[in-house]
Amino acid sequence: MGRVIRSQRKGPGGIFTAHVKRRKGAAKLRTIDYAERHGYIKGVVKEIIHDPGRGAPLAKVHFRDPYKFKINKETILAVEGMYTGQFVYFGKKALLSIGNCLPISQLPEGTIICNVEALEEEAGVAVEEEEEAGEDPL
């Protein structure tokens, strides 16, 4: 008989599984639509929450849907200096300030950045959390 390897000893569950019951959800930027590609859209930070198992806090941001009568609620990574009640602007023509989200092509050289998506819908894996804040490489 051979040696029993670790994954066989651990089995399908028990005390070795990740504790994900109280997690708050994935932190993603909003999907790119016409308003973001050609202008900007305004949202308000409703609350800043702690997500177990994550180093950076999350922010719940509410946006008014430009096409239907409803409110879109997004969970994004909170940046240092963000507060509840703050207006944040997402889009190509958003101004450069704390909490706003705009394309890298619109940023001046040397800007401190928090979260980068290499592709749309990637959820920012290049610089993932606030502790790993990077600089604009241009």
Image: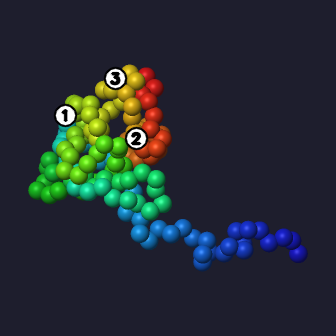
Task: Tell me the quarter of the picture where residue 36 sits.
Answer: top left
- Looking at the rendered image, the quarter that the N terminus falls into is bottom right
Which numbered circle lies on residue 115? 2
- Along the horizontal axis of the image, is 33 left or right of 51? left
Q: Amino acid at mark 2?
A: Asn
Element class at badge 1 = loop
Q: Is residue 80 left or right of residue 21?
A: left
Q: CA distance from mark 1 to mark 2?
A: 20 Å
Q: Quick one: 48 or 73, which is closer to the camera?
A: 48
Residue that appears at 57% across and 70% down:
17
Question: Where residue 85 sits in the image (x, y, percent)?
Answer: 19, 50
Residue 55: percent from left, percent from top: 46, 53
Alpha-carbon distance for marks 2 and 3? Answer: 16 Å
Task: In the displayed orientation, state which residue is furthest to the right.
Answer: 1
Q: Please give the residue where the numbered disc 1 appears in the rendered image.
A: 39
| Distance from Cα at disc 3 to Cα at disc 1 | 18 Å
Point out the frontmost of discs 3 and 1: 3
